[in-house]
Amino acid sequence: MKAMLLKSLGSLEQNPEPLELGELPVPEPADREILVKVTACGVCHTELDEIEGRTPPPRLPVVPGHQVVGTVVERGSGARAFAEGDRVGVAWIYSACGTCKFCESGNENLCASFKATGRDVNGGYAQYMTVPEAFAHVIPAAFSNVEAAPLLCAGAIGYRSLRLTNLEDGASLGLTGFGASAHLVLKLTRQVYPNSPVFVFARSEKERKFARELGATWAGDTTDEPPGNLSCIIDTTPAWKPVVEALRNLEPGGRLVINAIRKEDIDKHYLRGLDYPTHLWLEKEVKSVANVARRDVAEFLEIAAEMRLEPDIEEFALEEANRALIEVKSRRIRGAKVLVIQ
């Protein structure tokens, strides 16, 4: 089978083509696993974190990709949840232990044995992959393959982030960064919390224009002051500067939710400007988002189907994965990027 392989780590500035097209044997499903013929896979900033070493794979080479849509073509022994021909999705959460206190409470995203699709095991930048059937998801008929792919990570992690804000209808929401996840959060917020104004902070005027087109109340640069402090803010950037700026824009008792698996060190010096009275006093809160649980994915897919919450998509061939990653790195983003796999 064809697959895009990550064989070594390093910055995209030094190596703009970190993935190599190669041939691998079609994997065989183990007990209670299914073999999936991949039809689409979303491209995520987390792939950059893997490639550039901020959340490195435990071994190389590895096939990245964790927003996977495909068809079940074979079942391992004991796998009965899906039939051959069923359409399924695979998200960032590939597996967890199932017995710790986090797994038993439905928060297997916090499990110490958490395994990530496309990092700890081969993912969806390939024609086939295997997955434990308990960690595969039914894809609603409302969505095409490419529409469904970003919902599995950008959408699900955005949904978890929005829940963690404790937003109430009518309270203001800020979004710092406006890529694949944030544009879905904006669409979701406008339907679930119709009286809540949404304020978007983004470096690119194209992203700000896109946010306004989708219904943002206001859109400005990262350092611009919104017309009033905000009840809660979701940060989806890989940088520190937006975190400091977001804390400044929170109202007393407000909450900042940081939706990022890692932060880059390139602008870490902004943390030196953190001032307790300005940024943290008056009971402001900071909450991080760690991965997604299965229920986040399942709930969001159901909600998205009911609302017809369609992501904006840019399509690429599997062989164009490096170009898609470079565009993510350089913030040439309008919605979500998806690889279409033949």
Image (spheres, rainbow, N blue to C red):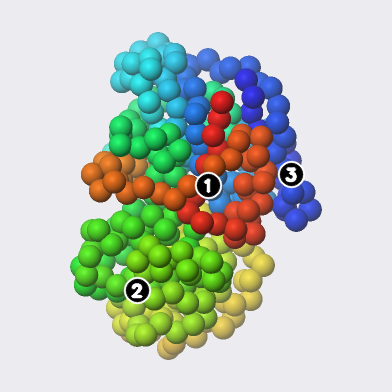
User: Mark 3 falls on what kind of element?
Assistant: loop
Give the image quarter of residue 58: top right
Residue furthest right as drawn: 14
Task: Kindly indicate whether the residue at mark 3 contacts the one at mark 2 (C-beta within 8 angstroms).
Answer: no
Residue furthest top as drawn: 77
Q: Which residue is mark 3?
A: 17
Q: Nearer the viewer, mark 1 or mark 3?
A: 1
Find residue 222 and report its horizontal and vertical position in percent. Answer: 52, 76
Find residue 260 and report its horizontal and vertical position in percent. Answer: 49, 58
CA gap, disc 2 and disc 1: 25 Å
Name the image quarter holding the C terminus.
Answer: top right
CA gap, disc 1 and disc 3: 19 Å
Q: Which residue is mark 1?
A: 314
User: Mark 1 falls on what kind of element?
Assistant: strand
Q: Which residue is mark 2?
A: 217
Find residue 221 and report its horizontal and vertical position in percent. Answer: 52, 77
Give the residue drawn at x 40%, y 65%. 213
> Which amino acid type corresponds to the residue marked 1 in the rendered image?
Glu
Give the residue drawn at x 70%, y 31%. 21
